[in-house]
Image (cartoon, rainbow, N blue to C red):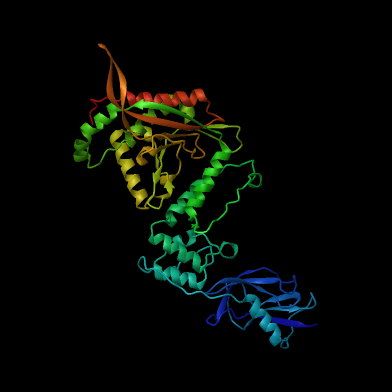
């Protein structure tokens, strides 16, 4: 009845210990030569430890999360299954077998480099459901990465574990402003998990295009928030058959009115008034006229949920280039001044990464202003589980025919395109088109003499 100790192999000159992150084999399992028995993490890398022997695992000497010194035994194998650990010293691997362990588990070491981006904050005292190697924790502490940020980093290691390179890539993106914060990611994940819809078409049915990489091409890893947005957009197109309708609205009265009152408004309210709260007010009126736009389809796709509250999401671009949609709750209960204050506050805190989780949840209709980027119109993707999204284009001066009591005349007017994407499962062209036209009607009927 031969028994063999498995010792922790050496994985580099400076590596003196390893943490057991996962037992791949359980006591009583049969282990083949070179079959992975345990997964470990060190200050340098994450790796798998293969067995240099064949036999049954009769004893684990450490639990997951325990630290084992290099050269110390961590498990015992036996040629017989139903046996107990021998009280006499078990045989140790030969030099050749030890060498085999070292070769099978050795990895190349890489130099650590970092960029200081903030004050040091300790993550070692905080508890996390994820495992982080000592090196990752050390870098996080040195670079002021909070536990929340650390948990948001997409790991490329074994089973999605965060590696040193993942942290360094995160730091590079953070320095350049191209990374989402942990709070943004967590709030987006929470919202998407609530709105996730069952998709009957499996990913295997979708033919993926082979993308060739040519000399000189740059490969940029998506940050986690961009991956979440991408998944949400693909899901939305699979769930909802999208249809987009367009109208052009004469918003001359709005432009002239805002130009007339904006200085007085800012002086009195200490707020700048943009076009967004004006658009939202008109959208809210139209939603009251057409409540079947303010709905959702349940996960069985057999029931329509008619929303009581009107919660307007406003798409906001972040400095990183990602997108977030803060929500104005009960927008129908706010006047124009109230809408202006909420819009400005949410937009500012979105740019500063200070939105709370509740502030990007519960939207029933979304507005996106593509005119901010000089675009005349767009075909936005529905923000599930909503059934419609409105895009407002840039406002341009155009010559137009003006009807007067004295007859028609040519004048210069301010025009804007509106585009509404809607879910054709529950919103037909008549409903979608009528709603869109009603929004335009409210914009065109704006009272140029309105008091603030």
Quadrant location of the C terminus in the rendered image: top left
User: Residue at left 65%, top 78%?
Assistant: 103
- Residue 58, position in %: x, y? 73, 76
Depicted 245 relative to depicted 30: above or below: above
- Position of residue 40 measured from the top left corner of the image (x, y, whole percent): 60, 72
Residue in the foreground of this view, choosing between 409 and 87: 409
**Residue at 46% across, 41% down:** 362
The image quarter in which residue 367 lies? top left
33 and 307: which is toward the camera: 33
Residue found farthest to the front? 215
435 or 226, which is in the foreground? Answer: 226
The location of residue 57, given as percent across then percent down, is 73, 74
- Could you say where residue 182 lies in the image, as x and y percent from the top left? 44, 57
Task: Give the total number of marks visible in the rendering.
Answer: 0
Compared across the picture, whether 310 is left or right of 65 comes to left
Q: Quadrant of the N terminus?
A: bottom right
Whether residue 193 appears in this view of the structure is no
Rendering quarter of residue 25: bottom right
């Amino acid at each position: 009845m031969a028994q063999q100790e498995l010792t922790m192999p050496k994985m580099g000159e400076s590596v003196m210990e390893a943490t057991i992150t996962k037992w791949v084999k359980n006591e009583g399992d049969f282990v083949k030569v070179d079959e992975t028995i345990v997964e470990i993490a060190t200050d340098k890398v994450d790796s798998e430890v293969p067995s240099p022997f064949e036999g049954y695992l009769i004893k684990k000497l450490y639990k997951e999360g325990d630290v084992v010194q290099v050269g110390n035994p961590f498990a015992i194998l036996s040629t017989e299954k139903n046996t107990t650990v021998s009280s006499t010293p078990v045989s140790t691997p030969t030099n050749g077998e030890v060498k085999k362990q070292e070769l099978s588990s050795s990895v190349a070491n890489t130099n650590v480099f970092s960029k200081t981006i903030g004050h040091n904050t300790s993550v070692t005292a905080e508890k996390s459901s994820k495992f982080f190697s000592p090196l990752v924790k050390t870098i996080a502490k040195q670079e002021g990465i909070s536990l929340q940020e650390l948990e948001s980093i997409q790991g490329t290691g074994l089973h999605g574990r965060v590696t040193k390179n993942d942290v360094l890539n995160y730091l590079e993106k953070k320095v350049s402003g191209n990374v989402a914060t942990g709070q943004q990611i967590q709030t987006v994940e929470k919202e998407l998990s609530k709105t996730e819809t069952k998709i009957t078409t499996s990913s295997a049915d979708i033919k993926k295009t082979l993308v060739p990489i040519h000399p000189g091409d740059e490969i940029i890893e998506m940050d986690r928030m961009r991956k979440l947005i991408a998944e949400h957009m693909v899901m939305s197109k699979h769930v909802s058959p999208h249809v987009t309708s367009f109208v052009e609205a004469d918003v001359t009265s709005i432009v002239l009115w805002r130009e007339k009152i904006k200085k007085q408004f800012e002086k009195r309210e200490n707020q700048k008034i943009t076009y967004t709260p004006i658009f939202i007010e008109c959208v809210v009126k139209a939603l009251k006229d057409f409540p079947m736009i303010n709905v959702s389809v349940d996960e069985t796709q057999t029931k329509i949920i008619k929303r009581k509250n009107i919660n307007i999401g406003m798409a906001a671009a972040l400095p990183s280039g990602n997108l977030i949609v803060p929500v104005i709750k009960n927008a129908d209960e706010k006047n124009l001044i109230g809408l202006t204050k909420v819009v400005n506050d949410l937009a500012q805190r979105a740019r500063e990464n200070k939105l709370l989780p509740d502030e990007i949840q519960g939207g029933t209709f979304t507005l996106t202003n593509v005119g901010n980027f000089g675009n005349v119109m767009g075909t936005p993707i529905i923000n599930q589980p909503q059934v419609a999204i409105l895009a407002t284009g840039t406002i341009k001066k155009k010559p137009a025919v003006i009807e007067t009591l004295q007859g028609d005349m040519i004048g210069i007017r301010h025009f804007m395109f509106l585009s509404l994407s809607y879910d054709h499962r529950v919103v037909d062209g008549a409903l979608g088109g009528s709603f869109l036209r009603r929004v335009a009607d409210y914009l065109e009927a704006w009272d140029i003499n309105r008091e603030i």
